[in-house]
Amino acid sequence: MTRTIVESKSKTAIIGFDQPFCVIGERINPTGRKKLAAELEAGDFSTVERDAVAQVLAGATVLDINAGVVYNSNPNPNETEPPLMRKIVELVQGLVDVPLCIDSSVPGALEAGLEVAEGRPLLNSVTGEEERLEQILPLVKKYNIPVVAISNDDTGISEDPDVRFAVAKKIVERAADFGIPAHDIVVDPLVMPVGAMGTAGLQVFALVRRLREELGVNTTCGASNISFGLPNRHGINNAFLPMAMGAGMTSAIMNPVALPVGPKKIAEKRAEVEATGIVLPADMDDEAFCQMFGLGSTKARAGKEMEAIRAANFLTNNDPHGGEWIKFNKAPAKEGEEGRGRGGRAGGRRRRA
């Protein structure tokens, strides 16, 4: 069985055909998050801290770390991204004990993250582009780490699944030239939006099966790509992930957290309920209201995608006797007890001074 080993200082995550699905939390990424980007440029890491802990509590087994901020004060990422990556990696691994995925298009930022990462992180990513192969594969060999291989090359992203398979095969073969084994290559076959390409789901399922059977590699994807531009994206994602798992996909880069319901949405729903003549108890707090009327929660918690993944783990016998499923569906912790492990923090380690 192909097994890709990813490690922190104290914890191991195994990506494999006979393992529970590996959830790689994507939230620590300023791309498309203007508020987070502005905070990072200002040296404010409070959102990073919250996102790190929330994702682990929601079930992420690896955290992706991306420091791709284009500073207003200095638009050169080759200068700004390496020290920022180093800072975020050090901060996050002081908060939680899950392995990390070092994610950047800047080779200097990748190496900066690898220099301070504890254990055996996953590197994200290499492509089939010649320049990228020559830059990244020596890093993978030097640090003896696994790497995400994205199925595009110098010609771009092909809509033809046979071409994407050929690019993945090329990367695996080139990696072998550097002495990097196939079990340390996690292929991203590239998920297309099903709203733009009706066969996108069928394509990726067929590709995953082929990558598993012919190349013997583990696979991953940006899970939310499948639902891009569509209404009720969670509904699409919830169907896609178990189907991808059934085809043999072994991990995904995704958001495991259902974000809290905000006060504006709660106020609108209260007004709607009261307009129907329903009299609410005077002492009903916002959390109880959200639970009663199906809004979600005022607290960050595991998202519906995590429910689908855990159910699929159970159904494929990667959760023997359903222990994780039962644990996942237990009543939430009481106020003030959320996420307590040893030392009272996510993963049970104390935060460094």
Image (cartoon, rainbow, N blue to C red):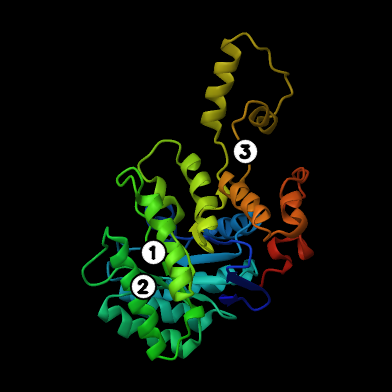
The image quadrant of residue 94 is bottom right
Q: How many labels does the image show?
A: 3
Residue located farthest toward the left when viewing the structure as drawn: 155
Q: Which residue was labeled with disc 2?
A: 168
The image quadrant of residue 18 is bottom right
Asked if residue 150 lies left or right of residue 339, the reply is left
Kindly identify the amino acid type of the residue bearing the numbered disc 1. Answer: Pro
- Decide which of 238, 248 is in the foreground and name it: 248
Q: Which residue was labeled with disc 3?
A: 298
- Decide which of 256, 215 is in the foreground and name it: 215
Kindly identify the amino acid type of the residue bearing the numbered disc 3. Answer: Thr
**Mark 2: few, some, or many residues within 10 Å (few <14, many ≥20)?**
many
Q: Can residue 34 be seen in this view?
A: no
Asked if residue 206 lies left or right of residue 337, the reply is left
**CB under 8 Å between discs 2 and 1:** yes
Among the two numbered marks 3 and 1 on one chain, the one whose residue lies closer to the N terminus: 1
Residue at (74% x, 23% y) in the render = 283
**Residue 302 tag number:** none
Q: Give the CA separation, mark 3 to mark 1.
A: 36 Å
Query: Where is 18 relative to 35, above or below?
Result: below
Residue at (40% x, 62% y) in the render = 207
- Report helix, strand or loop for mark 2: helix
| Quarter the N terminus occupies | bottom right
**Camera-side mark, 3 or 2:** 2
Q: Give the CA separation, mark 3 to mark 2.
A: 42 Å
Q: Give the CA separation, mark 2 to mark 1.
A: 8 Å
**Mark 3: few, some, or many residues within 10 Å (few <14, many ≥20)?**
some
**Residue 189 tag number:** 1
